[in-house]
Amino acid sequence: MFANLSNRLRGVAERLRGKGRLSEDNISEAVRDVRRALIEADVALSVVKDFTDRVRTRAVGAEITRSLNPGQAYVKILQDELTAVLGEGHRELNLRHQPPVIILLAGLQGVGKTTTAAKLALYLKERHKSSVMLASLDTRRPAAMLQLEQLASRVEAGFFKADAQTPVVTIAVNAVAQAKTDQADVLILDTAGRTRLDEELLDELRLLNTEVSPAETLFVVDSMAGQDAVHVAKAFGEALPLTGIIMTKTDGDARGGAALSVKSVTGQPIKFIGTGEKLTGLELFHPDRMASQILGMGDVVGLVEEVERKVDKDKADRLAKKLRKGRSFDLNDLRDQLEQMMNMGGLEGLLGKLPLPGGINKEQLAEKVDHKAIRRQVAVINSMTPGERRFPKVLNGSRKRRIAAGAGVTVPDVNRLVKQHVQMQKVMKKFSKGGMKQALRGMPGMPGR
């Protein structure tokens, strides 16, 4: 998301470098470029106008301090205004209610509400240690209730079973009663959607809101929907007392216009962003961090938080102790590292949060990466015997052919993995002896080589 917009906005700042002052002339040109970039990103025209007006007002005549050149000053202004458009500060869910806290998810069909309901349940269980119950109010879509029941089982959340012939409001009321009986902390209601907006859907949602009085009414929107998302968001915002927004499919080929528009249109904050199909793919939305990512400055704080949350500390400690004792870095250890990278969203997920030098296109770089390569490497290691994983030197031609056949790859694929392991083994050996500085010197392209 935001790939083209990010490149365009950084290009505007680059063109201002070397100028001694931000004047009316060069700012007018830069603002026009920003306006075009926002329109191409499918941002609502009203939002584009307000944004560019504020940028122009702040930028014209701005003095450039000794530490900032015009490009840097303009980037700071863009960052501040992007943060304002996306919403100042991140907003957590309001869970300070008598249990069960009711969360109502609303949105059109196909935006990912059901998967999001399960993701949200897992988020609440892991981050807030809450007991969660899920209930499907989608009596129209075939197998919708079964889908949510299966997802509830996967995230180990409770599920309220109901007959699809029962009126939706009755299901909701009964689910609330069951959640109280089961002493659930949170009840998530997954409502029905439509392929298009209609009054029947909005009337049903209004009635539900009146009957169950949810603490949170979250509008779930597909980030790839563009201007359509803005129109739908406005209609939902007028019909329901929304408390927040969840953007889904933000890892897809979205231009980003919806994210920069829905907050302004609804007046409600984006609370979460969803990525991928994995049930762990739900993150708190931080406007300031997203603004930094759009402008190519990464999200190092978010990356550190993700590492803290997703890296298996026990495995990391065991590996550190093993290396300190002088024991070799084997293929079991390599598999652990590869699996942890997958948990972090792979190389693409890491690149998205890293600040890279200007001129490097993260999206193009990520496209060059074979996203299935890590899974194939893990499959190769899993095809080996325990002895082969511990002592890779025993791998001869016949063993490699057997491993390749078992993993569904070629012998050259096995050879590449073995070569990669040897390189990492050397790095880890230097790390165990001389610490991080010595290890980095052993890596290609680093000083001291």
Image: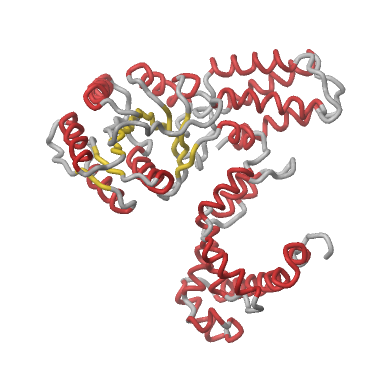
Which x, y percent locates residue 254?
52, 36
Q: Quadrant of residue 163?
A: top left
Residue 108 visible, this orientation = no
| Residue found at x 61% / y 69% | 320
Residue 354 visible, this orientation = yes
| Residue found at x 65% / y 25% | 80
| Residue found at x 17% / y 34% | 171
Which x, y percent locates residue 440?
75, 63
Which x, y percent locates residue 355?
68, 43
| Residue found at x 67% / y 31% | 8
**On the rendered image, what quadrant is the C terminus found in?**
bottom right
Judge left or right: residue 63 versus residue 313.
right
Closest to the observer, 217 or 250 = 217
**On the rendered image, what quadrant is the N terminus found in?**
top right
Judge left or right: residue 139 versus residue 61.
left
Which x, y percent locates residue 2?
58, 35
Closest to the observer, 1 or 436 = 436
